[in-house]
Amino acid sequence: MNGGAPPLADALRLAAAAWRAFRAGTSLDAALDQAQGGFVAIGTSHPRLAAAAKDIAYTAVRHLALIEALLHKLAHRAPEPAAAALLAVALGQLLAERHAAYAVVDQAVQAAKADAATRAASGFVNAVLRNALRRLPALRPELEREPAVALNAPRWWIDEVRRAEPARFAAILQLQRQPPPLVLRVNVRRAGVEAYLQRLRLEGIAATRVGPTAVWLHEPRPVHDIPGFDAGEVSVQDAGAQLAVPWLELDPGMRVLDACAAPGGKTAQLAEAADRLTIDAVDVDAARAARIEDNLGRTGAREHASIRVCVADAAAPQRYASGRYDRILLDAPCTASGIVRRHPDIPWLRRPADVAQLATAQARLLEALWPLLRPAGRLLYVVCSLFAEEGPQQAEAFARRHADARPVPLAGVGKPQLRLLPAQGDAWRQGLPTVHDGFFFAMFEKT
């Protein structure tokens, strides 16, 4: 509540409004955008309010199962939805210990009094939070004996991750409860990795190289405060995601399709990888496709490549393809089970049927794109998923359907498929990155 930060009460109110929409089935980012629009409409704004509310909401989601178990124990009656949402985000702050406990309670009560939907419940909010302060030390370990609480995921999701990784599922889920690392990709057209690290050292910013072009900033910061970001010298991109483009082994002048391209990080990386590429970047979502243009402009990608951004379903090539391609990068829609650190709402928004439905959509994309590839061309299939149905099983089924699809070893890996599990390791020396999310990669060449 100092140093130019917005009042905690306002940030709690905004986060609580987003929490209600999220628990009704809206993605957390969309819920935050909706809530922010409502606050602007009533004249409540602060330049850092949205960021503060996002941090509070994300923190609460990383403790969702524990928070809802605590509410069940702490409240003598089930709170109304608006009060329950305010209590949830305030409990998240108590659990994270970001502020003094008394300040969280005081500001939560002020937030309740400031909103007509919670004003009558301000005393109830105060009583529940004070009860939490007394009972948390004993209640928390008791509740965390339940796996869904300890691992912060629905039981079916835990079972799916266990099925995918029987020996490591608990470690993966615990790691995914943590905030994500801020990893950058250095634009090698504009800066060298070691030179950029030296620049960070001179500016007093702690950082580690964690991949060939990947730099991990130890302390998160707004993107516009990252040295070189606005000048296009670096982009925010997970170190695992950065592997895809080099594996395509691009030569100057190739035609490349970046399917499901938003928000454009890989499109910009493609343009940096070789001269005179012709790139079609396709995404079905017009709003997300606009972000491709933003990234291309910031990084100067069109200085080196001819790039066309198309708003279209990649599975309907008649809407965008004007010929065949030398390389196709398919970063397919998936459960996103490998990137829960970045999107902690994912396990709570997905449903068991989604795994099979998304695997069907991935197969549809592969079938639509394969005819677009020239002979001797290569297609790289990527998903940020841990689940076999979306990864190895999908790739193997595709190879069985297409006799002309030859699996090709990934450079430096020695095999045509790679599963990367979420990791938070040491400094990179050579080979695969050491700090990354979960991904699956499979390469095919058309014979």
Image (cartoon, rainbow, N blue to C red):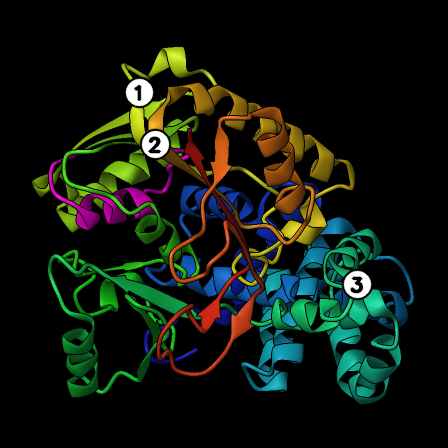
Q: Residues within 10 Å of mark 1 (few under 14, many from 20)?
A: some
Which residue position holds label 3? 68
Residue at image position (49%, 26%) is: 404
Task: Select label 2 or label 1 by which is in front.
Answer: 2
Residue extent of the magenta highlight = 259-277
Q: Nearer the viewer, residue 363 or 250?
A: 250
**Of helix, strand and loop, which one carries label 2?**
strand
Name the one closer to the observer, 77 or 60.
Answer: 60
Whether the residues at callouts 2 and 1 have beta carbons within 8 Å, the answer is yes
Which percent across, then down, holds residue 88? 70, 63
- Quarter of the image holding residue 77? bottom right
Q: Is residue 311 magenta?
A: no
Q: Which residue is mark 1?
A: 324
Instruction: Calculate the distance from the C-alpha at mark 3 to the C-alpha at mark 1.
Output: 52 Å
**Location of residue 171 in the rendering, given as x and y in whole percent from the top left corner:** 69, 74
Q: Is residue 314 visible?
A: no
Q: Secondary structure at mark 1?
A: loop
The mark that comes first in sequence, 3 or 1, is: 3
Q: Amino acid at mark 2?
A: Gly
Q: Count the labels in the image.
A: 3
